[in-house]
Image (cartoon, rainbow, N blue to C red):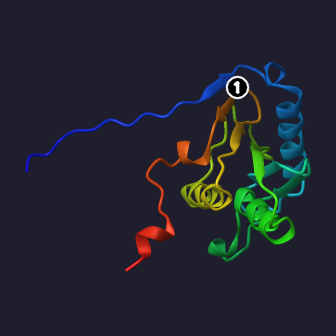
Amino acid sequence: MPITQHEHSIQYSRCETVQDLTAAQQSLIESAFQASDLAYAPYSKFNVGAAAKLKSGAVVTASNKENASFPAGICAERNLLNYISDHFPTDEIRSLAVTVNPLEFEVGEPISPCGVCRQVMCEVEKNQSTPFEILLKGTTGEVLIFDSASSLLPFHFYLKELKR
């Protein structure tokens, strides 16, 4: 069988400034930025904050936590999603914002979740049976808006692939 080439594209929106967003989006990004102040990142000095708006209206925040044993740390996004899973198990995420506030430099482009966080976001989306908006913001500059976590990881992995 011959090899065939395929193309996959993602769609997202860009806002030049936070002021171009809705009031709800601006507030969520501000909550994520405030959460970055709670980060424990003495090694990288790369403080990340995440905030989620739930269907109930609750806004939940978290930050990254490093550890001298580097694999033992956790990203802000997974920290947030794990907290929501434990404390709001029947609620749904409607929107999630991720920002960065490094201590020693600025990031002029939107922060992008790592692959592990993208995979966890996709599974949360799958489990709640509805996509959620993702807002990504650097220290300065534009904001990227995605309609779903699967937009960030189009070939995600799910439990159904593990069934025998």
Residue at disc 1, secondary structure: loop
Which class describes the residues within 10 Å of circle 1: few (<14), some (14-19), or many (20+)? Answer: some
- Position of 38 with respect to 143 (left or right) is right
Quadrant in which the C terminus appears:
bottom left
Residue at 55% x, 47% y: name it.
150
Q: Residue lying furthest left in this view?
A: 1
- Position of 3 with respect to 41 (left or right) is left
Q: Position of residue 152 (x, y in %)?
A: 55, 45
Q: Which residue type carries mark 1?
A: Glu
Q: Position of residue 61 (x, y in %)?
A: 86, 54
* Residue in the foreground of this view, choosing between 47 and 34: 34
Q: Provide the residue designation for mark 1.
A: 142
* Residue in the foreground of this view, choosing between 36 and 45: 36
Residue at 87% x, 33% y: name it.
24
* Residue in the foreground of this view, choosing between 16 and 124: 124
151 vs 19: above or below: below
Within the image, what quadrant is residue 18 found in? top right
Q: Visible in this render: residue 109? A: no
Residue at 50% x, 70% y: name it.
159
* Residue in the foreground of this view, choosing between 73 and 8: 8
Within the image, what quadrant is residue 114 found in? bottom right
